[in-house]
Image (cartoon, grey):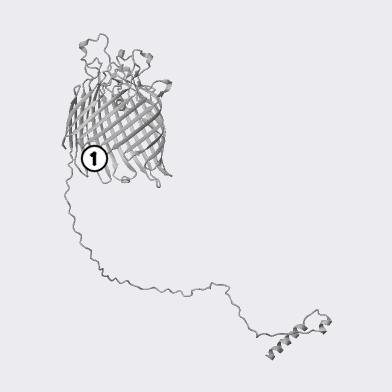
């Protein structure tokens, strides 16, 4: 203790003597200094820290040891014994008999027989074939005619064959039809003897023979890009020497395009008419031949976005027309957009839709007589082009009720209209109706409602209202501005089926009134009520009753062509 104190005093003295800048008084008189030592000195070691917490290491061993192992399988006992399941009893279920044939025969007023026969092969996973034939004719029943008979006869005969391959289905079909229509809308000439009212009016036979072959894939991509291929041909002629050859090749393709395929319709068509004016009384200088070649491409695709469905497409037509008359040849190309969209306002209940579409109709001889069979041979065949823009709604009114509403604008260039001169009674050449082409524009609104009641009653109601405008304010001959239809079907105890249809056709303008004030230029509207009752006596035997024009309405189909009066027919059917 004493030694420590001595060392401390010595060091302090040296520190004081070494201080610079002091005065003499301070050097001479250092004053008094008192030191107090309270405890012994204790050394303290501060906590140390690493400058780099991550060590720097390096693997100097390069040799890798290859492990050796093996798996030894050993079965483990499973202590589980399921209870045996009793075998199910398989009962023999009789297949419902499939009748392969049906024959119906009947007879009605105005000497009107009907005969139908159908036959189809039995159940088979490889092939299917069948035959069909029908005949219907009526002799008279039209009031106010000078002729005793106005015969209408429709005869059809055909057959088909299908073969089911693993990747595709091959379908072939042949048809023939022989139809007769009288030009009975011809009044008696002057001094027409009463006893000659049994004479037969001029008539026409339409004879048509058709065949087609189609190839359809059984499942997607079985035929690659090709989905369907169809080839058809028909030949048609009439009593006055007109002939028509019509050949078509149609194909459907599915072209891969990322996640959405592109669909393509590629079609070729050709039809030619020969001696299209050979009818009694025609001038031989009016004879001419026509040929029309048509190529069509229709690519389209479907897209979905935010609940919307969009269908986009283009309809492209190239039409080459040739004519034996000088200056009548033409090559035309047509382009139509196809844009359609739909959106579910209420999913699975109400959907809004709209779009713009277009198409071309060739107006072949067969197509025109389907429109009206009373055309006089000797008509031009011009293609019609239709462009339509529409908006609509479709949805459900209940579990068994559906409806659709549509409105829009439609324009058809070269629409084929049925026209008859108001002085036809003095015309010895044009027996029947003529074809006139005009551009028809119309605003329209249509609707349809369909409902089912307990799977026994089905009711369908539809109506269409349209305006009719043509160039130069010409009338749209024989086109109605309003049509409606009410149809109902009722099944009673699976024995009796009743079907009825009430149709209203509005007024139609036939010609300009000043051309003949003695005739009514506006054909009045009419109601057409039809009724059919089928009774199933047993599985094989059935009977039917058919009524036409049940209200016995007096109206004209076309100018000078009144309709048949009340018609009744009954018959029997047999299945085998």
Which corner quadrant holds the C terminus? top left
Q: How far from the left and from the top, in percent, is residue 569?
A: 20, 26
Hey, which residue is sitting farthest bottom in the picture?
2
Residue 489 on image: x %, y %: 26, 33
Count neighbours of disc 1 (C-alpha within 10 A) and say few if under 14, some if 14 to 19, many if 20 or more: some
Q: How many circles with numbers are drawn on the protein?
A: 1
Name the quadrant containing residue 474: top left
Residue 247 vs residue 377, the one in the foreground: 377
Q: Nearer the viewer, residue 341 or 375?
A: 341
Residue 427 at what x, y percent from top left? Answer: 31, 14
Please identify the quadrant where the N terminus is shown: bottom right
Q: In the rendering, at what x and y percent does residue 102 appear?
A: 18, 34
Residue found 31% across the figure and 12% down from its top: 426
The answer to which image quadrant residue 515 occupies is top left
- Name the one closer to the observer, 8 or 171: 8
Note whether 148 is above or below 86 in the view shown. Answer: above
Q: Residue furthest right?
A: 24
Which residue shows up at 19% across the image and 39% down it?
121
- Residue 86 higher or lower than 117, as above or below: below
Where, by quadrant of the figure, is residue 40 drawn? bottom right
Q: Kindly identify the residue that appears in the image at 18 percent across and 26 percent down.
A: 107
- Evaluate whether residue 313 shows in this view: no
Instruction: Answer whether residue 262 is visible to the viewer in this image.
Output: yes
Vertical placement of 386 versus 56: above or below? above
Secondary structure at badge 1 equals strand
- Residue identified by numbered label 1: 162
Q: Nearer the viewer, residue 427 or 380?
A: 427
């Amino acid at each position: 203790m004493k030694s420590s104190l001595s060392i401390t005093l010595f060091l302090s003295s040296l520190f004081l003597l070494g201080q610079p800048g002091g005065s003499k008084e301070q050097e001479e008189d250092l004053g008094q200094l008192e030191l107090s030592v309270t405890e012994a000195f204790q050394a303290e070691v501060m906590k140390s820290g690493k400058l780099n917490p991550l060590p720097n290491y390096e693997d100097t061993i390069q040799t890798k040891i290859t492990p050796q192992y093996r798996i030894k399988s050993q079965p483990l006992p499973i202590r589980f014994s399921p209870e045996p399941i009793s075998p199910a009893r398989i009962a023999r279920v009789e297949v419902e008999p499939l009748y392969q044939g049906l024959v119906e025969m009947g007879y009605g007023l105005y000497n009107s027989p009907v005969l139908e026969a159908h036959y189809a092969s039995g159940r088979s996973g490889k092939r299917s074939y069948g035959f069909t034939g029908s005949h219907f004719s009526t002799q008279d029943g039209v009031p106010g005619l000078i002729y005793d008979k106005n015969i209408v006869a429709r005869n059809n005969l055909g057959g088909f064959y299908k073969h089911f391959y693993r990747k595709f289905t091959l379908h072939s079909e042949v048809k023939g039809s022989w139809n007769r229509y009288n030009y009975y809308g011809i009044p008696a000439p002057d001094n027409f003897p009463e006893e000659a009212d049994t004479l037969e009016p001029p008539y026409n036979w339409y004879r048509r023979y058709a065949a087609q072959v189609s190839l359809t894939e059984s499942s997607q991509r079985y035929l690659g890009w090709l989905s369907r291929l169809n080839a058809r041909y028909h030949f048609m002629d009439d009593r006055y020497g007109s002939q028509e050859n019509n050949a078509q090749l149609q194909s459907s393709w599915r072209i891969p395009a990322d996640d959405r395929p592109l669909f393509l319709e590629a079609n070729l068509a050709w039809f030619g008419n020969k001696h299209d004016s050979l009818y009694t009384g025609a001038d031989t200088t009016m004879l001419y031949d026509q040929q029309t070649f048509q190529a069509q491409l229709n690519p389209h695709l479907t897209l979905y976005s935010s609940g919307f469905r969009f269908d986009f497409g283009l309809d492209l037509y190239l039409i080459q027309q040739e004519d034996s008359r000088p200056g009548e040849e033409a090559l035309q190309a047509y382009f139509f957009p196809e844009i359609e969209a739909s959106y579910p306002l209420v999913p699975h209940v109400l959907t809004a839709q709209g779009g713009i579409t277009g198409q071309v109709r060739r107006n072949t001889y067969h197509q025109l007589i389907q429109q009206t069979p009373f055309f006089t041979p000797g008509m031009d065949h011009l293609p019609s082009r239709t462009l339509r823009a529409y908006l609509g709604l479709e949805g459900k009114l209940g579990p068994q009720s559906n409806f659709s509403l549509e409105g829009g604008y439609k324009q058809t260039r070269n629409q084929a209209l049925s026209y008859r001169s108001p002085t036809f009674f003095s015309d010895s050449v044009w027996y029947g109706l003529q074809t006139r082409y005009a551009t028809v524009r119309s605003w329209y609104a249509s609707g349809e409602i369909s409902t089912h009641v307990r799977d026994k009653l089905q009711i369908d109601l539809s109506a269409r209202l349209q305006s009719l405008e043509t160039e130069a304010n010409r009338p749209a001959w024989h086109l109605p501005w309003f049509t409606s239809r009410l149809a109902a079907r009722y099944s009673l105890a699976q024995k009796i089926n009743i079907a009825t249809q009430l149709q209203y056709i509005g007024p139609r303008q036939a010609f300009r009134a000043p051309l003949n004030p003695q005739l009514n230029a506006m054909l009045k509207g009419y109601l057409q009520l039809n009724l059919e009752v089928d009774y199933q006596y047993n599985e094989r035997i059935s009977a039917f009753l058919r009524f036409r024009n049940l209200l016995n309405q007096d109206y004209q189909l076309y100018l000078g062509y009144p309709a048949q009066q009340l018609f009744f027919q009954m018959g029997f059917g047999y299945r085998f």
